[in-house]
Amino acid sequence: MELRSLAQNALQRLQHAGFDQALVRTSKRQMDEININHNQASLFRSTEEISLLMEGIIAGRKASITVTQLDEQALTAAVNDLLAAAERAPADEANQVSSAQQIDHQQGPLHSDPELLASKAQEILTFRQAQAPAMQIQEGLASYTCRTVCLLTSKGTDLSASVGYFELSVCGCAKQEQQNSSSNSAGGNCAELSLAPANEWFGIGEMMQTQEQLIVTQSLREKFVGEVILAPQAVEDLLYWLLAQLSDECLLSGSSLYQQELNKVITSPLLSITNRHRAVDCLPFNEEGFVIPEIELLVDGKLQHLLPSFYASNKLKLPHLPTGNGWVIKPGQTKRAEMIAGVERGAIVNRLSMGDPAKNGDFSAVIKNSFLIEQGRQQHGLSEVMIAGNVANMLRDIVAVSQETLDTGALSLPWLRISGVHFS
């Protein structure tokens, strides 16, 4: 059944079942992929998945269900299950569905190109053999995905979109004789994969060559307080911590450090963050049924918005600003080489390994795929080294933002130089 007809049919069923408000979302995901395993292309496959999400609210009680069996009998059973689940749920007036949201959007390539995928997979293997022979690709992927979604609500929201994109990714470690580096990965999504060789996308080539430099590593001679240069993969951890502080879990629990900090400077003035509301691999609307607008979240360190969901905004009486998965940290004025040259003692950190920081932002993390910096020069790779600090303080202690950025589709992130970090 065509997605719109399926969504309309499901919405009618929910309304006839007695729900006061309802939301339905039909989704189709088509994918062609070439897998790479152990330095060889190993599999080509095509898949198609269709699913239906139904949410119903009755007397403030909300429940949801997702089904992949879409015949008459399965849909009838799903509506009955949803009604029973809603009757057991707690009543909450904050439960609402979106109203009067409208968009019909197409983005990116809407047809696959298997020959292009095959050529990009071969480019990765050829680059590895010629430029990074010690790198062992444990898993790799060259794929095309097309997502088609239709979302309707009982309050007049009608959203539809088709988004197509290509993906490349590589994961593995470098090996030489009896030694090997720790594992690392690189990858992302784009609309025009043919514009550059595979190794030039998403830092894949640089990651593979860097892994060869990390086969032999050393630990620190002593503890010290110094600086880190966080690569985009590590910057991502800081970004998501900040977004979590501004979103539902922290806002609803009252544990957010920034709930009362609107229009105040909360980070280094070098940091500005905007959303990417038309990211190559993202829908133009979110799962709650709201079109995503352009957002300036942080301007020169000043917090412009909180990010509650529609439910949390109703619950906490906060302004609602729909968000998605795309974000950009604006590039700065400093070249990466200049950032390194300015560090007396510290490390280039490509990956952080840590659990969730404490509620106040305190953390300790193992730094992986990282290099020591001394007197402005990159030195040997590091092993068994930890850093400790506070994420909120790190965001305030940013002293440089790189001109260079890494664009992986949903995210575009620079390198950050941060002072006052404890090494051990």
Image (cartoon, rainbow, N blue to C red):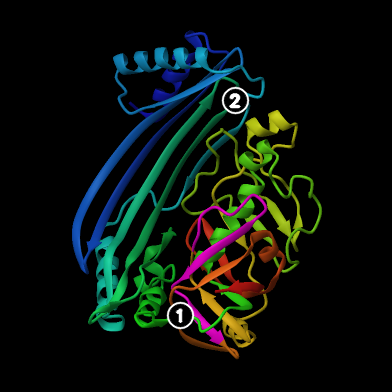
Which comes sooner in the sequence, label 2 or label 1?
Answer: 2
Is residue 300 visible in the rendered structure shown here? yes
In the rendered image, which quarter is residue 201 located in?
bottom left
Q: Is residue 158 magenta?
A: no
Residue type at the position of mark 1: Ser
Farthest residue in the right direction?
A: 264
In the rendered image, which quarter is residue 382 located in?
bottom left
Kindly state the secondary structure of the residue where label 2 is placed.
Answer: loop
Image position of 150 (left or right of 117): right
3D distance between C-alphas at marks 2 and 1: 54 Å
Considering only vertical position in the picture, is 53 above or below 154?
below
Q: Nearer the viewer, residue 109 or 423?
A: 423
Image position of 371 (left or right of 261): left
Considering only vertical position in the picture, is 376 above or below 129?
below
Q: Nearer the viewer, residue 34 or 354?
A: 354
Q: Position of residue 175 (x, y in %)?
A: 27, 77
Pointer 1 residue: 219
Nearer mark to the viewer, of 2 and 1? 1
